[in-house]
Amino acid sequence: MSLSCPDNDQRDLRVPPRTVVRRFHEVASVTALALIAGCSTPEKAPPAPPPPVVPTIKPLPPMGAVEEMSIPEVGDDGKYLTPNRGVTANTALWHVRMALNVAALSCHGVNEPARIQYNQILHVHEAALREANAAVDRNYLVAYGTGGLKARELLNTVVYNFFALPPVTKSFCAVAIEVGAKVLAMPSNQLLAYAPEALAALEKPFQDFYAAYADYLRRLAEWQSRFGGTVTVVVSPTPLPPPPAPPREVASGFIPAAPVTPPSAMVPGAPVRVEVPTFPLTPMRETFIPVQ
């Protein structure tokens, strides 16, 4: 007996109508969903995160200086007006001596070289310093007559306070030790020629400080305009008035025909008026070389 399967080609492959309808609905649904997805508006990207908060730092005075500090005005030469401007050679040498005196009192460190140098300078250059002191006395005598000593003492106080400005002490001491070493190493007959250069070197740290403080005031004003609207800041303090200028040089053989007095001392008993800066004056101890 042989077994045979029905012929597949001869089978009735007709699909019931209900099945056809169901498949059509499935295909139509998928197509509709695809069309809707293609025509729909894409979702908006999430908003960008806010920028990071940058802390605003209020500018601070340079070198640990105080706020609302007054600084000198700038002269025609572009430098700040100081009591060392327009000095003669003898006055420059005496101001150098006063600056090194301040360094001896203020510059402390290993072996205190500033103090040792200063004491040695007083001994090695005693004659030259005495001559410079006498020349400066003579200049004030001619310019102010009997009021010369008072005028000179006032200017000396201004000079001492200038070189003793606390924020500049650190940078000043390094220069003072360098200048002191040069003064100690050179012959006395070269001091007058070197004095203006030495004085300019000793003053430079203070000129740099004033420039840094002026820049701080500029940055403070910018900071206040941007971030510190509720902060009251003195941006432009009253500048210091120009310090008194020393008198001109007088030849050593000059003898005034009559005592010369300033206009304010014309009336007998009237005090000598010398304009000095208004910042607090703190006289410092100094070592004067007596005139013999």
Image (tube, rainbow, N blue to C red):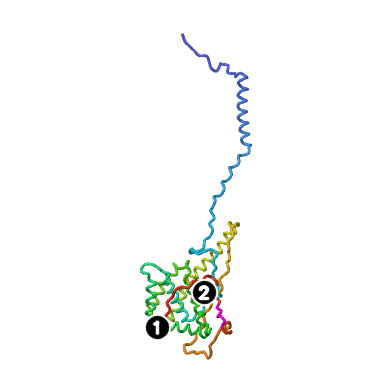
Q: Residue at x 60, y 24 (%)?
A: 23
Residue 196, how many percent across, how many down? Answer: 46, 78
Alpha carbon of mark 2 to alpha carbon of mark 1: how far?
28 Å
Q: Residues within 10 Å of mark 2 (few under 14, many from 20)?
A: many
Please give the residue where the numbered disc 1 appears in the rendered image. Answer: 127
Q: Residue at x 37, y 73 (%)?
A: 116
Look at the numbered disc 1 and give the secondary structure of its residue.
Answer: helix
Q: Nearer the viewer, residue 19 or 94?
A: 94
Q: Residues within 10 Å of mark 1 (few under 14, many from 20)?
A: some
- Give the magenta part as a residue range: 269-274
Q: Residue at x 46, y 76 (%)?
A: 199
Please give the residue where the numbered disc 2 appears in the rendered image. Answer: 82
Look at the numbered disc 2 and give the secondary structure of its residue.
Answer: loop
Query: Is residue 65 left or right of 179 when viewed as pictured?
Result: right
| Mark 1 residue type | Ala
Q: Which of 144 and 22 is in front in this view?
A: 144
> Which of marks 1 and 2 precedes in the sequence?
2
